Amino acid sequence: MPQPATFAERLHMIVGDRGVAAFSRKSGISESAIRKYLKEGTQPSLDNLITIASTAGVSIDWLALGGTHGRLLKHVGAEGPEGDERFIIPATPSSVGDDYARQIEAESATVPVLSVKLAPDGPMSGEVVITCESSLPRDWLLTADVTPETSFLVEVQGDAMSPMLEEGDLVLGELEDRVERGVYAASLDGYLRVAHFFRRGDVIVMKDEYEEREVQDDPSFRLIGRVRRRLTGLRS
């Protein structure tokens, strides 16, 4: 089978049987824009490129460049067969313009996708682990008020932050060790939690749609960092 050599061909492979309308709803990008990318070969803006890549679970460099940039969102140290990795597609030369290629490739940063797994040292204890890696443009991270070297991605679990954040949403954050007031990612009760956190005096409080609780002295609590931007879902 011929491998996708252009951005439009790679986008067509991603949209697949879901169709333009379904992919538009999932990504939040208009149907007209997606059809333009597919039919006219128009290159998306950087924000839309990032959104398309995160919706499909592929890396930005592969989506934009193809060629030897066949690096997709790849599980790192994950249990299970290699077939569990997403969209492992042989690469072919890309026809994307040199300027666009340099914009994506030269200024990219590797960003870990974090999760929490139960740790063996006690009940309800969670260990923060890297499950995937992706790459995002450094300039774009800075516009999102995130330092590239301390950036991370996490996938929202559950509906406790709906409608602000839905299950499966991918959010961008920055590692921090102090809570002010805002949305943060944390390990709590052995699970990844994305919720509102704030201080009540010297006490750290977590609040979502289902509960409000003090976590300052909870031995299972470990702050990961502040959420800066919602991207979109990894899951189809």
Image (cartoon, helix red, strand yellow):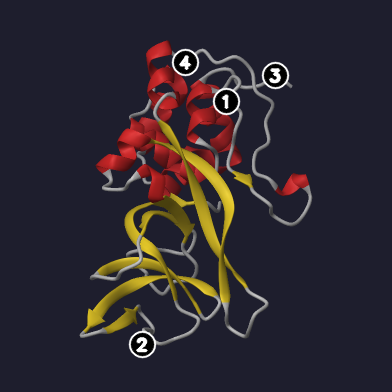
Cα distance in 3D space between marks 1 and 4: 12 Å
The mark that comes first in sequence, 2 or 4, is: 4
Residue pictured at 68% horizontal, 36% vertical = 88
Residue pictured at 37% horizontal, 14% vertical = 99
Cα distance in 3D space between marks 3 and 4: 17 Å
Residue pictured at 26% horizontal, 76% vertical = 198
130 vs 192: above or below: above
Q: Where on the picture, by quarter, is residue 117?
A: bottom right
Q: Are marks 1 and 4 in contact (CB under 8 Å)?
A: no
- Label 4: which secondary element: loop
Residue of label 4? 96
Cα distance in 3D space between marks 2 and 1: 45 Å
Kindly report which numbered mark, 3 or 1, lies closer to the viewer in this rendering: 1
Q: Nearer the viewer, residue 3 or 62?
A: 62
Say which mark, if any, is on residue 149.
none
Measuring from the top left, give residue 216's x and y in whole percent: 36, 84
What type is the residue that disc 1 sits on? His
